[in-house]
Amino acid sequence: MGIFAGIVLLSILMIVHELGHFLTGLKLGFRILEFSLFMGPVLYSREHNGIRYSIKLLPIGASVRFAGEEEEEMNGFDPRDPGLFFNRPRWARAIVIGTGPAVNLISGVLAFLILFASFGYTIPVIQDTYQDTLAQSAGLVAGDRIISANGQAVRTTLDYTAVDLFTPDGEAIELVVEREGQGQRTVLLQPITTERYRLGVTIEPELSGDGAIIAEVDADSNQGQPALAVGDVLLAVNDIPYSDTEGFRDAVQVSAGQPLSVEILRDGQPQTVSMVAIQSQVSLPRGVWFATSREFVPAIGQSFQWSWSIVKVTVKSIGAIFTGEAKAEDTLSGPIGVVSMVSNVVENEQPIRDKIYQLLWLFALISVSLGFMNLLPIPPLDGHHLVLIGVEAIRRKRLEPQLQTIIGMVGLGLIVFLGLAGLFFDIMRLVGG
């Protein structure tokens, strides 16, 4: 069921894209040969007003064929037919080509608007600051609005997150913040390393009731004689329950290496073990936590701004691959990765509200990414065709077919390489490699 949902979502995105080409082509007088749903062998086909409408076997994607778009299809057509693709004005061709990506981008904006209006959205305003974070040490307070981070404008929380992700932990982040009625000021999140006592365990992201499941135990825990084990559920330390996050942490910290009484569940049975916390060097987290809003009018602007933020992050991520700042396997993903993400959302046991939220989020994210990527000037993407139209406008004639073929083959090779790389990394992620 999850895989099917992933394929459906991907197909919707591709169908919307091709509908953009089809509907504008129909409106602007292009002669259209066929509009097809899905790919592969034809299951059903019917002709209406000179256009063949087909449904194909493989339930993914869509396609539209314009008369005269491919040189090899010119046989049987009057070369003077004004409906042929290259007989239409350049502005009309540019609109038809650009509408596909534009519809994807608009779909993403609308999905974000529905998401934000229904569930709320984060805004680049500090909600609160917490003890032992760089945000608190730097003097950030609730209500501060982040204007820029490391010189880059912050209009969405994703803008800040991008700076945070691409800034190594050992480097500072310079923020320009603004507080109502107090003007702007500069705040520096300067890395701080401090001594901390800890139990020496890593916990699972999911809680077990009011406790935390231990995922890993350090070998040097409890002075090299671990008293806790993987699978134990942490309940309390010195009678301070784990649900009291700050109290639990403070109890471990103030112990200063003295014995602690740790209450756990082991194999479903309650136990109390005695152990000492270990001292280690800890880098304080940046600790920037954002406020949320449900206001509708600002959500409209945020929908556009979030879409633009995704484009900026995509460009930055691609650049980071070439500069070595990011690994290709952590950045590239293909159709299998998309289907896998949707499948995980559908199959995970969680409230239906959370599933709708995550599916809307994925739809918006992938729509914007698909629209932007299709505008890149790489054959055979739509952006390449728009560049050719621009060159044609400058030269007053089309590029020679042989040159277009060479450019197309190089670009197609690059797309195939990236597609195979994305496929490989998707498979590696699925098998846990």
Image (cartoon, rainbow, N blue to C red):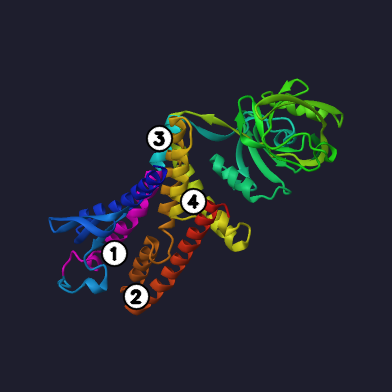
x then y, percent, for residue 205:
61, 36
* In the displayed structure image, the side of residue 427 where residue 1 appears, left or right: left
Q: Quadrant of residue 342?
A: top left
Which residue is pictured at 17% across the width and 58% down the height? Answer: 52
**Pair 2/1: label in front:** 2
> Can you identify the residue that label 2 sits on?
399
Please state which of residues 432 and 180 is positioned toward the viewer in this rendering: 432
Q: Quadrant of residue 377?
A: bottom left
Q: Which mark is residue 263?
A: none
> Can you identify the residue that label 3 sits on?
114
Disc 4, SS? helix
Q: CA distance from mark 2 to mark 1?
A: 14 Å
Q: Which mark is residue 90?
A: 1
Please state which of residues 283 and 43 is positioned toward the viewer in this rendering: 43
Quadrant of the drawing holding the C terminus: bottom right
Disc 2, SS? loop
Q: Main secondary structure of the magenta part?
A: helix
> Can you identify the residue that label 4 sits on?
311
Identity of the amino acid at label 3? Answer: Ile
Graded by Cα atoms within 10 Å as few (under 14), some (14 to 19) or many (20 or more), the crowding at tag 2 reads some
